[in-house]
Image (tube, rainbow, N blue to C red):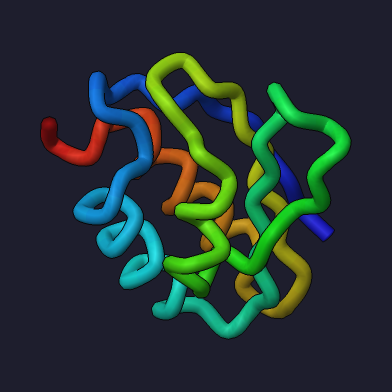
């Protein structure tokens, strides 16, 4: 298991377009990947390969998140997705 934290920086948060980019990137990896909204700790982490699950977290600008992965490419998956979040999805 490997994990890392990041903060959503784009003004519109993780809405449909960046969420679809995120899912597309996540699906490149074989590991099981989860994302958690750290501002709502009562919510369970969700499948990072499911756009519906990601949108259900309601992540807006400045939302802290934690990505975790378990599998053969877990470090690469978390590092790539964290970099995508930190890039602001090109917005």
Tell me the quadrant of the picture where the N terminus can be found.
Answer: bottom right
Counting the numbered discs, the total is 0
Please, is residue 3 above or below residue 62 in the view?
A: below
Up the image or down, 29 lies above or below 21; here it is below
Instruction: Name the one closer to the observer, 26 or 19.
Output: 19
* Residue located at (43% from left, 78% from top): 27
- Is 59 on the left or on the right of 68, as rendered? left
* Residue farthest to the left, as pictured: 91
* Image position, residue 82 (x, y; %): 48, 41
Q: Quadrant of residue 17?
A: bottom left
Quarter where residue 24 is shown? bottom left
- Residue 21 percent location from the top left of the image: 26, 60
Q: Residue drawn at (74%, 76%), measured in percent from left and top?
A: 71
| Residue sticking out furthest to the top | 62
Residue at the far bottom in the pictured view: 30
As drawn, is 63 to the left or to the right of 68? left
Quarter holding the C terminus is top left
Residue 36 placement (x, y as % from top left): 69, 44
- Left or right, residue 13 beside residue 60: left
Q: Residue at x 37, y 41 (%)?
A: 14
Where residue 55 sits in the image (x, y, percent)?
A: 46, 53
For residue 5, above or below residue 71: above
């Amino acid at each position: 298991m490997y994990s890392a934290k990041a903060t959503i920086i784009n003004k519109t948060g993780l809405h449909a377009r960046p969420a679809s980019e995120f899912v597309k990137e996540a699906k490149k990896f074989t590991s099981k990947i989860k994302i958690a909204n750290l501002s709502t700790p009562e919510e369970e982490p969700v499948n990072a390969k499911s756009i519906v699950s990601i949108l259900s977290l309601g992540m807006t600008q400045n939302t802290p998140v934690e990505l975790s992965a378990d599998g053969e490419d877990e470090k690469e998956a978390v590092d790539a997705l964290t970099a995508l979040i930190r890039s602001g999805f090109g917005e």
